């Protein structure tokens, strides 16, 4: 099998590093490459090759490749995910060897869990979600599809994080809360109450800043 990391920016290189660490332990992939249409085809990127999606579709055995999306913006992640799904492509889940994942947790296709993250018992990481370094996810938590958690985020037990939601660095979410879809929680925010869909919240205690109209993070 070959692993294709879709998007070759800074996050893509970080995911490449994780894949290399996994391969040293498991020898899971014969080859790890990038696919990024903003970079010339067949160009070397970060010690490997980059190929356009069209080149991969035309020249690779699609039964022997799997994809992971290395993009930190939920609106981009979900668009890319469904574009690749239309081609019937398979998705890999990437879990750094240093992450601690409960045996009762469920990690779905396309999810990425970075180094030193912790996912506790009976939690669910849905498809295409991204969990960055040292994030702590309590028991019975659901992380929605294409959601992104930044480094050092803490999610209290029995909470739900909606689809395409972004949680900024160091944010804290109290237990038993529901954070809606397409929400942005700013870095360092401390959330004590439920947050409805499509809002941006900031501060301690977290308060609504405005509606998340553009849905763009970066």
Image (cartoon, rainbow, N blue to C red):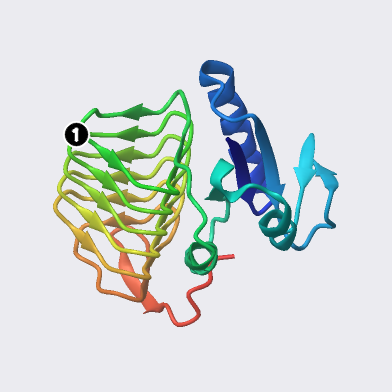
The structure residue drawn at horizontal position 19% and vertical position 34%, both measured from the top left corner, is: 121
Tell me which corner region of the image, top left, top right, bottom left or bottom right, holds residue 52: bottom right
Assess disc 1: are there few (<14), some (14-19) or many (≥20) residues with their C-alpha within 10 Å of its C-alpha. some
Relative to 162, does residue 109 appear above or below in the rendering?
A: above
Q: Which residue is mark 1?
A: 121
Q: Is residue 37 left or right of residue 11?
A: right
Residue 7 visible somewhere in the drawing:
yes
Q: Is residue 163 left or right of residue 13?
A: left
Residue 206, image x and y in percent? 31, 63
Q: How many marks?
A: 1
Q: Is residue 201 left or right of residue 193?
A: right
Tell me which corner region of the image, top left, top right, bottom left or bottom right, holds residue 103: top left
The structure residue drawn at horizontal position 21% and vertical position 50%, both measured from the top left corner, is: 174
Viewer-proximal residue, 184 or 40?
A: 40
Viewer-proximal residue, 65 or 47?
A: 65
Residue 28, image x and y in percent? 54, 27
In the current view of this chain or complex, which residue is farthest to the top? 25
Viewer-proximal residue, 14 or 6?
A: 6
Look at the image and tell me in which quarter the C terminus lies: bottom right
Look at the image and tell me in which quarter the N terminus lies: top right
């Amino acid at each position: 099998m070959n692993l294709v990391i879709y998007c070759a920016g800074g996050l893509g290189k970080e995911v490449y590093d994780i894949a290399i660490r996994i391969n040293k332990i498991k020898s899971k992939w014969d080859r790890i490459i990038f696919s990024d249409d903003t970079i010339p085809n067949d160009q070397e990127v970060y010690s490997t090759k980059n190929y356009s999606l069209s080149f991969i579709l035309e020249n690779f055995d699609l039964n022997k490749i799997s994809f992971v999306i290395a993009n930190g913006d939920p609106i981009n992640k979900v668009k890319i995910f469904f574009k690749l799904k239309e081609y019937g492509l398979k998705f890999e889940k990437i879990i750094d060897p240093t992450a601690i994942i409960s045996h009762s947790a469920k990690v779905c296709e396309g999810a990425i869990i970075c180094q030193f993250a912790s996912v506790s018992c009976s939690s669910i990481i849905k498809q295409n979600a991204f969990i960055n370094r040292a994030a702590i996810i309590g028991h019975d938590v659901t992380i929605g599809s294409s959601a992104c958690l930044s480094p050092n985020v803490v999610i209290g037990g029995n909470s739900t994080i909606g689809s395409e939601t972004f949680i900024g660095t160091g944010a804290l979410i109290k237990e038993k809360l529901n954070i809606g879809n397409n929400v942005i929680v700013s870095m360092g925010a401390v959330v004590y109450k439920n947050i409805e869909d499509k809002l941006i919240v900031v501060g301690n205690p977290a308060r609504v800043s405005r509606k998340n109209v553009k849905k763009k993070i970066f």
